[in-house]
Structures are given as C-alpha cells and as structure tokens.
Image: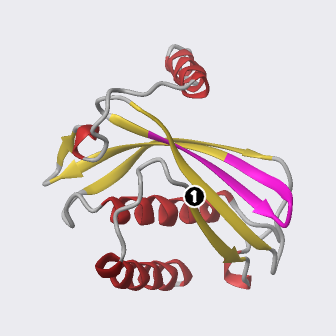
Amino acid sequence: MNLLLRYLILCLMLKSDKAKSSKPSYSDAIIRHYRILPHDMGFRHHVPNYRYLSFIELNIQQWLMQQRPTDELGWVIASQQLTYIKESFLFDKLALRSQLLAWDKKYLYFRHEFWVKNDLYVVALTKIVLMLDQQVQPTSVIVQQDEQAHPVIKTWQDNLNEIKKLTPIK
C-alpha cells in the first residue's frame, strides 16, 4: 500500500510538471527522498532487499515519464544487482540518486546510490528493456545516440555470463 501511494504521488507530481517544463536530458540524475517508515521494515528490523528495489523502480519510472516518448511505453527489469555498505533503519531519510549509465540497442543500464546524510549505504545496477504492446522496443525510442558503454557495465555483463555457465544446483 505504501509503494502504491508513493507511486500515485509521483505520477501526480510528474503530470503537473509535464505541462510546464521542458524535457530533461536522458543523462540527468533522478534524485528522490524516502523516509523509512514502519511498513518499509523487514522482520529483522532493517530495510529488506525488496524495498530498495521498489524505490529504484519509482526512480526509473520517474525517468521514463520525464522522457515522454509515449504514455504507452513500459519497461521490464532484466537484471539487478545491489551491494550493501551500511544498514538502513527506521526513520532514516534516504536520498536515492539514479542515473542512466550506459545503453545498447536493447537495454538501458542505470546506476543507483542510496545515501543517508553524507554516507553511502547501498549501490545498485539495473538493466531494463523497453516494452510497447508486449514487444521489446529499441533504446533508440528514447536515446537517439549511438550505444554508450561503461567499464562497470562490461564487468557486470561478464559476471552475468559466467554465472550462466555454472553447473546447475542439484
């Protein structure tokens, strides 16, 4: 319920901004603040993985809505990686900074940083694919530039490829 309310607030805020502002650059950072409330907590009294992923989804949705290619364009997460540096607790105020880091013909790659005051708590990577009418769309519907690589994404892709080669767990 908490995530749905945050999503509705985001949509209303962006719809009002849409009429009065120009389209931001696709490389502009998205910065949103979230207060950790009791319903954000897991059973071990800290913020669980799924809540960080929910905050990331809100930032990506904001980025996509600001790019405004079409209201029907959606997206699906293809892969994510989170690295925890410090633990977040009840009533911490998180600043989530998300930015498009790289892209190829099929995927957009975002990096995310969760900050509490001046301390970095979590870093994450997200790979998304754009969708329209259940069909994968090229990233060129948003980013009208040649592919942009990044060494962090290359290392991440290499790691994912190695994981796929592992013998299945039995």
**Magenta span includes 58:** no
Give the residue drawn at x 60%, y 60%.
Answer: 50
Residue 31 in picture, x, y percent from top left: 60, 64
Residue 124 in picture, x, y percent from top left: 64, 45
**Magenta span includes 117:** yes
* Above or below: residue 152 compared with residue 83: above
Residue that numbered label 1 is attached to: 53
Residue 164 in picture, x, y percent from top left: 49, 20
Viewport quadrant of the C terminus: top right
Does 17 sit left or right of 170 as displayed?
left
Give the residue drawn at x 29%, y 80%.
Answer: 19
Circle 1: residue type? Leu
Q: Which span is picked out in magenta? A: 109-123
Q: Name the colouring of the figure.
A: secondary structure
Work out whether residue 5 or residue 20 is closer to the camera in this orientation and state it. 20
* Above or below: residue 166 compared with residue 56: above
